[in-house]
């Protein structure tokens, strides 16, 4: 299992620390500006002093810059906190099964499961289970199926007890091919966040982006 709750807690703490640092930096910028303004006023030509409009303009500029910096930092902090919260919530997926895009099936205990999405009804749907060398290990005849998501299970029997196989689908309606989308069912072993991207560690399939999940079971 990889990064889950501990990393999310650390991310929340880092986001809070970043907010405090931002506030301190903004206050420091204002302090430096005021010191420069006082120095400017102290050393100005008494015969040609800075007028009120010029002073007001400078103060407005520092206020605008500080405001923009604070807004940008607030957005950055919020993004970090939302990412950490998402990581915490996603940790509940560990141990659950998900359907993801792909035609590879992890085999566990001699069994594997998958699904296909049919764009239209088909009067014939067949699934060929393939070995790593694309050798046909088995054929599953699903018969006629309606449009939509259709699930299937494969019992490897004595062929294999673990590992990964792939599959291909042949679906047709009155001799015309029906477009299909292959899906794999796998168990979530862990959650991680890399550069703001949420990833799932799937048994037999490795790491996959969170947004590739089509269903949680």
Image: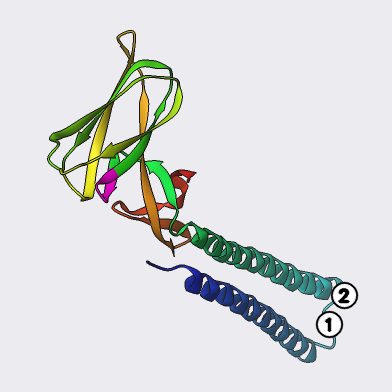
Report the label total. Answer: 2
Which residue lies under the disc numbered 1?
Answer: 49
Could you say which disc has been placed on residue 95 in the image?
none
x then y, percent, for residue 169:
28, 27
Q: CA distance from mark 1 to mark 2?
A: 9 Å
**As displayed, is residue 217 above or below residue 5?**
above
Whether the magenta-drawn stretch holds residue 38 is answered as: no
x then y, percent, for residue 196:
48, 61
Of 153 and 44, which appears nearest the observer? 153
Q: Residue furthest top?
A: 174
Whether residue 35 sits left or right of residue 90 in the image: it is: right
Q: Quadrant of residue 21?
A: bottom right
Of 9 and 29, which appears nearest the observer? 9
Quadrant the N terminus occupies: bottom left
Q: Quadrant of residue 77?
A: bottom right
Q: Quadrant of residue 24?
A: bottom right
**Secondary structure under badge 1?**
loop
Rendered residue at 38%/35% (across/down): 115
Which residue lies under the disc numbered 2?
Answer: 52
Whether residue 143 sits left or right of residue 78 in the image: it is: left
Q: Which residues are magenta?
A: 105-111
Q: Residue furthest right?
A: 52
Callout 2: few (<14), some (14-19), or many (20+) C-alpha neighbours within 10 Å?
few
Magenta residues, dominant SS class: strand
- The answer to whether mark 1 and mark 2 are in CB contact below 8 A is no
**As displayed, is residue 98 above or below residue 181?**
below
Of 214 and 47, which appears nearest the observer? 214
**Secondary structure under badge 2?**
helix
């Amino acid at each position: 299992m990889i990064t889950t709750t501990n990393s999310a807690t650390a991310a929340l703490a880092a986001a809070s620390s970043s907010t405090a640092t931002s506030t301190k930096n903004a206050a420091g910028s204002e302090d430096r500006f005021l010191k420069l303004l006082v120095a400017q006023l102290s050393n100005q030509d008494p015969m040609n002093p800075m007028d009120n409009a010029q002073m007001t303009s400078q103060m407005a500029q520092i206020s605008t810059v500080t405001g923009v910096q604070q807004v940008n930092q607030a957005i950055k902090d919020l993004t970090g906190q939302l990412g950490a919260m998402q990581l915490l919530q996603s940790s509940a997926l560990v141990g659950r099964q998900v359907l993801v895009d792909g035609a590879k099936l992890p085999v566990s205990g001699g069994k594997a499961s998958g699904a296909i999405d049919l764009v239209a009804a088909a009067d014939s749907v067949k699934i060929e289970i393939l070995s790593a060398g694309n050798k046909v290990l088995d054929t599953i005849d699903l018969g006629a199926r309606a449009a939509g998501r259709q699930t299937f299970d494969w019992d490897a029997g004595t062929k294999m007890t673990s590992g990964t196989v792939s599959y291909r689908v042949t679906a047709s309606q009155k001799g015309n091919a029906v477009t299909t989308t292959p899906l794999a069912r796998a168990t979530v072993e862990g959650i991680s966040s890399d550069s703001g991207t949420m990833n799932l560690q799937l048994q037999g399939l490795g790491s996959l982006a969170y947004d590739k999940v089509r269903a949680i079971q």
